Amino acid sequence: MSEHGSDSMRYLESIEGIEPSHLEGFFQGWRCKPTPQQFLAILGGSSRVVLAWDASSARVVGFINALSDGRLMAFIPLLEVLPAFRGRGIGSALVRRMLTRLNEHYAVDVVCDADVVSFYKRHDLRSGHSMMRRNYEWPQPLANLCEDGTQE
Ligand SMILES: CC(C)(COP(=O)(O)OP(=O)(O)OC[C@H]1O[C@@H](n2cnc3c(N)ncnc32)[C@H](O)[C@@H]1OP(=O)(O)O)[C@@H](O)C(=O)NCCC(=O)NCCS
């Protein structure tokens, strides 16, 4: 399968055969970022994933994941394309494929930075309000966790 003029780009909808070494370079700009091993576990724990696999370099160069209750609500927590591969339509292809997979849901929600709003609007998502909590020291425990790691 190829798309947008790149014969070496394939879009995978499972992590079968994916190893941590295929997942280097993501979470650009994050203060604390998952290791490739943790990243693979995050993908494995997701309801759906789409990976952009560059066959010529044998690695993942973009991904999107979704968490879903299987019927009503789905959330897209993460979308990223490695900087060297941006601007080639890969991010759009990932979003399109994921939205198609999530077609049966009532809602698909994304929380994103303001500069990505116009990108998502191109895919017929509209702006709303969101509430969020972030632990920028992740994977360190949040303040309300006990020293032994259990929740207060
Ligand atoms: C957002 C992101 C996934 C887009 O990936 P990409 O492969 O470059 O996207 P595309 O090539 O499909 O871009 C499609 C169009 O959207 C535009 N676009 C890309 N990134 C954009 C952004 N951050 N804001 C607004 N428009 C953007 C492109 O200019 C392009 O426009 P064009 O068709 O007029 O040339 C990528 O920039 C990225 O990984 N950013 C950092 C992580 C991030 O912000 N993720 C979203 C978190 S929810």
Image: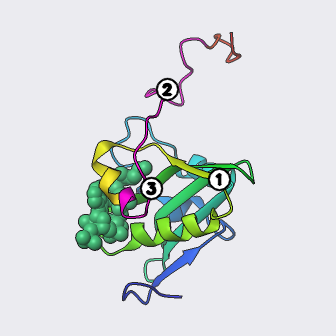
Q: Which mark is residue 106?
A: 1
Residue 31 location, quadrant: top left
In the rendered structure, are the residues bearing label 2 and label 1 in contact, judged by CB atoms less than 8 Å apart? no
Distance of label 2 from label 1 (alpha carbons): 24 Å
Near-viewer residue (152 or 16):
152
Provide the secondary structure element on which disc 2 rests: loop
The stretch drawn in magenta includes residue 112: no
Note whether residue 55 is visible: no
Q: Which residue is mark 3?
A: 125
Residue at image coords 48%, 26%: 135
Amino acid type at circle 3 is Leu
Which amino acid is tagged 2? Arg
Give ligand 1's quarter of the image.
Answer: bottom left
Q: Which residues are magenta?
A: 120-144
Q: Position of residue 50 (x, y in %)?
A: 57, 66
Distance of label 2 from label 3 (alpha carbons): 22 Å
Of badges 2 and 1, nearer the viewer stands 1
Q: Which residue is mark 2?
A: 133
The residue sitting at 67% across, 18% down in the picture is 149
Q: Nearer the viewer, mark 2 or mark 3?
A: 3
Residue 27 located left or right of residue 151: left
Q: Residue at x 55, y 64 (%)?
A: 99
Q: Position of residue 57 (x, y in %)?
A: 43, 77
Determine the main secondary structure of the stretch shown in magenta.
loop
User: The C terminus lies in which quarter of the figure?
Assistant: top right
